[in-house]
Each structure stands twice: as C-alpha cells, then as structure tokens.
Amino acid sequence: MATVSCRADELVRAAETLHLHGRAHRGIDPKGGEIIVSGGWFRYQVVLRSERVYIVQITYLGF
C-alpha cells in the first residue's frame, strides 16, 4: 500500500505540472491508465476540471 501511495503522489505531481489550469480546461480528460507496482498494479483516472486524480482499482497479487 505504501508503494501505491508513493506512486499516486508522483502521479498527482505530474498532473499538476502538465495541466496548470485544470479548472479552465474545456476539452475531454486525458485517458487514465495503469501503473504496475511491486505485488500488483492500480488503475487511475485524471479529472482536470475537478483537479483530482482518482484511484479506481487496486489489484494486489500477494507477492
């Protein structure tokens, strides 16, 4: 869980850098994705107008 939290923090910082004016965004949101971490992966979605990154699924494989 600590690895997911660390990667999610990195993802938020990257989104802040790429999309400086999120509330003013008038297009479609960028496509979400998956990030592989030790023991599994997580799926995320960036919603620019609300200035949020949502973790929509965490998959833990137990190793």
Image (tube, helix red, strand yellow):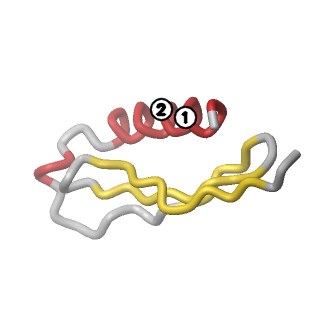
* Spot occupied by residue 55 in the image (x, y as percentages of width and height): 47, 54
Q: Residue furthest bottom?
A: 28
Residue 1 quadrant? top right
* Spot occupied by residue 10 in the image (x, y as percentages of width and height): 51, 32
Q: Looking at numbered disc 1 in the image, what kind of residue is underneath it? A: Ser
| Residue at which label 2 appears | 9
Residue 21 quadrant? top left
In the displayed structure, 44 sits above or below 1; it is below
Residue in the image at 30% along x and 48% along y: 52
Q: Relative to the observer, which residue lies in front, 33 or 6?
A: 6
Quadrant including the C terminus: top right
Q: Looking at numbered disc 2 in the image, what kind of residue is underneath it? A: Asp
C-beta proximity under 8 Å, tags 2 and 1:
yes
Residue in the image at 55% along x and 34% along y: 5
Q: Residue furthest left?
A: 24
In the displayed structure, 62 sits above or below 28; it is above
| Residue at which label 1 appears | 5
| Secondary structure of the residue carrying numbered label 2 | helix
Q: Residue furthest right?
A: 63
Task: Tell us which disc is closer to us: 2 or 1.
Answer: 1
Crowding near pointer 1: few (<14 within 10 Å), some, many (20+)?
few
Residue in the image at 62% along x and 54% along y: 42
* The disc label shown at residue 19, or none: none
Residue in the image at 58% along x and 36% along y: 7
Residue 60 quadrant? bottom right
